[in-house]
Image: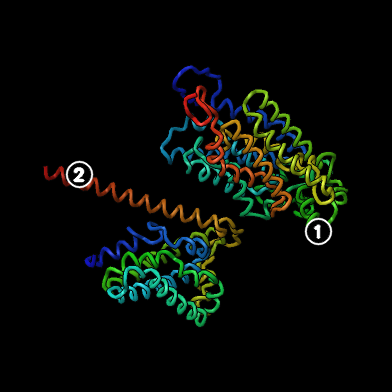
Amino acid sequence: MRFKTFSSPHMAPARSVNRVMGQVLLALIPGTAAMTWYFGWGVLINVSLAVTVALACEALMLLVRGRTLTPHITDLSAVLAGWLFALAVPPLTPWWVTLVGVGFAMVVAKHLYGGLGYNPFNPAMVGYVVVLISFPREMTLWLSPSVIAELNLSLPQTFAAIFAGTLPDGLTWDMITAATPLDRIQTGVGLAHPISEIQNSPFFGYLGGVGWEWIGLWFLVGGLWLLKRGVIGWQIPVAMLGTLTLLSGLFWLINPETYASPLFHVFSGAAILGAFFIATDPVSASTTPRGRLIFGAGVGALVFVIRTWGGYAEGVAFAVLLMNMMVPLIDHYTQPRVFGKTTAGKEG
Amino acid sequence: MNDTPYGKIVADGLWYNNAALVQLLGLCPLLAISGTVVNALGLGLATTLTLIASNVSVSFIRNWVRPEIRIPIYVLIIASVVTAIELAMNAYFHELYLVLGIFIPLIVTNCAIIGRAEAFASKHTIPKAFVDGLIMGIGFTLVLVALGGMREAIGQGTLFDQAHLMFGEAARGLTVTLIEDYRGFLLAILPPGAFIGLGLLLAVKNLVDDRLAKRAARRAEALGEARA
């Protein structure tokens, strides 16, 4: 879809919604591949399922709302929302959880607010938060990374786990699932264990958790490519990761035994995925350059606060949604100066 | 002002001026207590009783209260009524009283009640004030129960869970399990579920009103054509 721009002079970049979305999807591939490598087939099954559900819901809502199917369904925004949702949930998430989450994301968070361009909240994150607070047990089905796991499920076994909720004979959920590194830190610190002791386990690597650090690095590669292509601005990722590093670094310097290091914070969980792919959503994020800095910094600060003192081990989704709520206010106070006028808007 | 016909009082209370769906008053208890049908029904009935008693009392003294001090007097009346209902519930429905907790005394602050006292009861005769209190209360209770039913069915897959709190031990069998082995959908039980549920109810009401208005317009048009 191309939006017509009125009043000259403007350069028309060859950039349409589906081109932008397509490039973001391409940039997600390395990270998704890394996630599949470490967490098994479940990741790919979740992505395919979530994308299918997202497209079906999008088509349904377009029909209900009396809109035409094209160009809305081919603009890839639904594909991206489903894909991001699938990356946020654990690899063995039961199929009905994905159905509920993506359905809620597309129907309520996107179309009830008016569809692409009108949604105040990031649809994928709304869907994820809905299932996160509704199905706490299912949302803990993270696996041990394949490189340290004693056994890995094959493709048919993963299918059975996701669609029928059954595991191969002799296996229990407790044997294959494992807490994420962020979970371990939060639980351990809650029990007053020093961080050096918590991290002295095979689940922790050089930067963050085993596997997670590589996933983060591959998402970083995709994100940097998006930056280079000019698909996303530098402000949100830099402000978000910068604030996260700064805050966690400050507390880490005060007491490295109760506060995890900044490197761990950046390379664990969804920090990098969130900084480059989720918080940069052009619809629900701030739109002014200074506003984006504030928006990103807010997300980074909230991620640190939620991870350190909150009830959930990972806070990217909550942080993004909370800052989405602030966007109208941020945008209002950060309007750039119009050429030929003073900052107060008077003729200069 | 004393000429509102009974039919209009009923239609307003149940639909066109529904306390919860149109005036959007009393949302705090509405959203907080609508987790299950039984809780919703309990609070709805308590609110209805309060509305009737306060409406009748306010209407009774309407000619003697000076307008300058009417609001404090209404508040005193409502507070006395709610205190009496709270004590009665504590005595006869003790377990339900424990479940509803702070929201029974909080009926005092339900704007729907003082709203009806000010806008209706202080200007109408006692029988009309009684009917208005009853119908407004029923309208509020219906919305509360609809929301409670939605949230309970989606949230835990049952209806009339814990009915014995209200109707005694004989009512334990009333509980309907809609879906066996339901995993529960916590969002519906948590506060966001109340907001989303109320939003959906409002949307349904607006949709129905829209359809009714369109149908009325079409009928008027047809009538006009027939006359021409």
Q: Give residue A38's quadrant in the image.
A: top right
Q: Chain of mark 1?
A: A
Q: Residues within 10 Å of mark 2 (few under 14, many from 20)?
A: few
Residue A191, numbered label: 1
Is residue A45 shown left or right of residue B226? right
Depth check: A191 or A123 in front? A191
Is residue A4 shown left or right of residue A151? left
The picture places residue A52, in percent across and down from the top left corner, at 58, 38
Depth check: A20 or A75 in front? A20
Mark 1: which amino acid? Leu
Rendered residue at 22%/66% (across/down): B3
Depth check: B86 or A85 in front? B86
The picture places residue A123, in percent across and down from the top left corner, at 56, 41
The picture places residue A34, in percent across and down from the top left corner, at 75, 35
Q: Residues within 10 Å of mark 1 (few under 14, many from 20)?
A: few
Which residue is the extreme one toward the left?
A: B228
Label 2 sits on residue: B221
Q: What secondary structure is marked by label 2?
A: helix
Is residue A53 shown left or right of residue A309? left
- Respond whether the residues carrying marks 1 and 2 are from the same subunit: no
